Image (tube, rainbow, N blue to C red):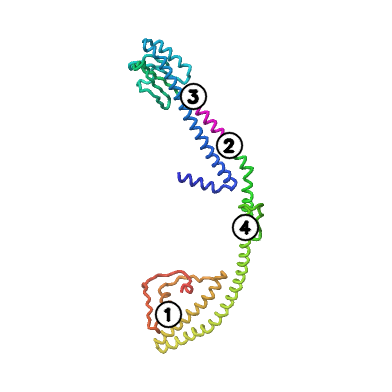
Amino acid sequence: MTAIVSRLRSRFSQLSIQRKLLAIVLATTFVALGLAVGLQTAFDYVAFRDRLSRDLTRLAESTALISEASLVFDDPAEATGILQTLRAQPQIVRAAIWRNGELFAHYGDPTKTLEEVRPDGTYADSDFLTVFRTIRRGDEVLGVLQVQSDWRDLSDRARASILAAVVTLSIALLVTVLLISRLQGLITRPILSLAKVANSVRKNRDYSVRAPREVGDGELAQLVDEGFNEMLAEIQLHDEEVTSARKEAEQANQRKSHFLANMSHELRTPLNAIVGYAELLTEDAAKEGRDQVVTDLARIHSGGTHLLALINDVLDLSKIEAGKLELTLESFKVLPLLKDVGSVPSPLLENNRNEFTLRAGDDLGTIYADARHLR
């Protein structure tokens, strides 16, 4: 059930506003008229059924009254003749007079009469309406009259009521469709015009266009003038401000890129000298066997190389923004890279009596990446 409702909602949401309006009005009209006609039909059905019951009860009472003599004089033939007069009522299918629990006279098929004699009253089931009336003479009980009728008239009346209801609903829905087709343009035309302008703005990004103003001061006029058109004006102003800010940002970015290029050139020149002298001093210290100096010079060389790499990274930011950064991919071991990175802050930490400890497995394997950028 939930899946069906969800599917109906999905299909309804895909309809145009004209079809949605038509569907809503038709559904409302159908439910309202259907409920009214259904209640009227049910009321008419119940009233007609009660009337049939009352008519059958009066008929049974009059028949019981005139059958009293036949029971007093023990004349089944006369009683049968009285019951035969019920054939004037087509809905009466059978009748019987019972005396002392035995069939005294009957009309119709006696095998289909009820075998059980019930107390006086009216009994209804899905097929028949049966009335029992005791035939008395003073306080003496002479017998029981049973009259049974089918629901033929009631079924005919119900079919006629249902047919009338269907015709009424069909005419009402047809009139509703004709009226909606004539009048819905008063509501949908401005909305469709507004949707057309909105779609044009979305496609062309032209916020200078405006939706045509609606006549009057109603909700649609307010929606177009005070809502949509004012919103377009604000968006247009904001778009102009954004465009101006974007141009200024692009100019500032160009100036930044130019500054970074000049700064990196000025910084790399002395750094290259530091790295070069560190390499020369390392070779001289190694020849003299001064291992501690070699270690210190190696740190200077590594730090200068790393600082030079950082400057190159600054340049890479400009390359990334321009979409021109190229990666140098290769396979290399991870552990040496970690040790190299860990050696950079070590001198600064030792000056403040801090320690930098690297804990890593002996075999971390290799990685395929750009070593400089990863470092």
Q: Are marks 1 and 4 in contact (CB under 8 Å)?
A: no
Q: Amino acid at mark 1?
A: Pro
**Residue 371 image offset from top left, x and y in percent:** 47, 73
Report how far apart the C-alphas of labels 1 and 4 lie in the structure. 63 Å
Image quadrant assignment for residue 73: top left
Q: Amino acid at mark 4?
A: Glu
Secondary structure, mark 4, is helix
Pointer 2: what residue? 172
Give the main secondary structure of the magenta stretch.
helix
- Crowdedness near tag 2: few (<14), some (14–19) or many (≥20) residues, C-alpha within 10 Å: some
Name the amino acid type tagged 2: Ala
Q: Is residue 125 left or right of residue 192?
A: left
Q: Which residue is mark 3?
A: 153
**Where does the magenta region start and end?**
156-168
128 in relation to 260, above or below: above
- Classify mark 2: helix, strand or loop: helix
The amino acid type of the residue labelled 3 equals Asp
Marks 3/1: CA–CA distance: 106 Å
Which residue in the structure is indicated by mark 1? Answer: 345
